[in-house]
Image (tube, rainbow, N blue to C red):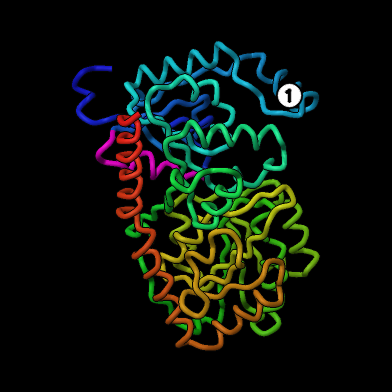
Amino acid sequence: MQENDRKQPVVTAYLPTFLPSDMRHVYRQIVGVKRYRNAVIVRKRKNEASFPLPEERIRMVRRPLSRALRRWWFAQVKKGMIPLSAGETREILDAIAWHGTDVFHVYFGSVAAQLLPVLRKLSCPIVVSFHGADAGVDTENHAYREALKEVFEVAELVLARSESLVKRLRELGCHQDKLRLNPTGIPTEAFPFKQRVIPPEDGCWRFLQVCRLVEKKGLPVSLRAFVEVRKTHPSAEFHIAGDGPLRVELEALARELDADQSVHFHGFVDQAQLARLAGDAHIFLHPSQMGADGNREGVPNAMLEAMSTGLPVVATRHGGIPEAVTGGESGFLVNEGDCRAVAAASLDLMADPDLYRKCAQGASDVIEQRFATSGAVGILEACYDEALEIGRSH
């Protein structure tokens, strides 16, 4: 790295893929910091137009041809994680050195567990961020839990997206002294507040849910709740943006419920499309639930983006959602899996324009006060400052 590139300390992020389409929040973190120079190490590059980064800030490391066989062996026979080979370890260490790394930031605890052969050899401070699934899925696996305990030991700081996730990481063995809250940053200028006419002039109430189509998002609950709402408001529409393994099953459920003409599947949408959908909608649904595999939410990013536009939320008391949504102030919270309660809360909002306007303004205010990008970036930079200071004292 050239000497004139060393004006700022360097934070090197490690991610297996830069970046899946549903990881806008990670991209915002990486490029949002101003007092640190960002760099990444990845195995695969995707969606380059959506997530641009100068080529000199990206270092690719190879995926060995033998990795597929090793994945099968360790998953099916050894029942454990796939360890890095000596060659992979050397290549990643070389990439860290090439970037002139001052702080090494590993995204996702599950990735950090696989990177332990690298982390054990580093002299620069290590920051690991957890996002939800990595503190739930596979944590009943003894090998993974033991690996996480070592991750907690070698990391200077462990970041979590919500207070509920901080609590979960304590349960898994992370010392409170290392834990820091790392909230998602929402670019409020991209999701401006919109004053909606309530009730809608055309009589068409539009519901929205934006997420990966996976079990923990509670989409069958949303669909059944929407059908209940349509009994009172037959012209209502439900717009679902996102993609995932449950799409065919959810489309079949919409047909089974005789709601397929009112339910619209948009597939994955970019930031501008999401802003338009949120601006046209009246209520955001997000009845998250614990997945059978232990998958849980941090704080859903799309929900926060929608709230920024003044969209009241009907969601569940799950994960970090109650840290963003307060009943009667920015929406309503109900118990997991309760489609009738989701419908009832929605109907309450629809029946009371004053309550609706209060929750709309409250939703926007929460994002401006607690989740705006400027504040979130400042918190992340402070974590990097602290990690550097801890590293110097060792």
Query: Does 310 sit above or below residue 289?
Result: below
Q: Nearer the viewer, residue 353 or 59?
A: 59
Query: Does 346 sit above or below residue 8?
Result: below
Give residue 157's quadrant in the image. Answer: top left
Q: Is residue 143 left or right of residue 374?
A: right
At label 1, counting other C-alpha atoms closer than 10 Å, the crowd grade (few under 14, some 14-19, many 20 or more) is some
Q: Is residue 160 magenta?
A: no
Query: Does 258 sit above or below residue 4?
Result: below
Q: Position of residue 22 (x, y in %)?
A: 53, 45
Q: Residue drawn 47% across and 37% down?
A: 128
Q: Residue drawn 46% across and 21% down?
A: 60
Quadrant (top left/top right/bottom left/bottom right) for the C terminus: top left
To which residue does mark 1 refer?
A: 74
Q: Amino acid at mark 1?
A: Phe
Residue range (magenta)? 22-36
Judged by its main secondary structure, the magenta piece is helix
Q: Is residue 28 magenta?
A: yes
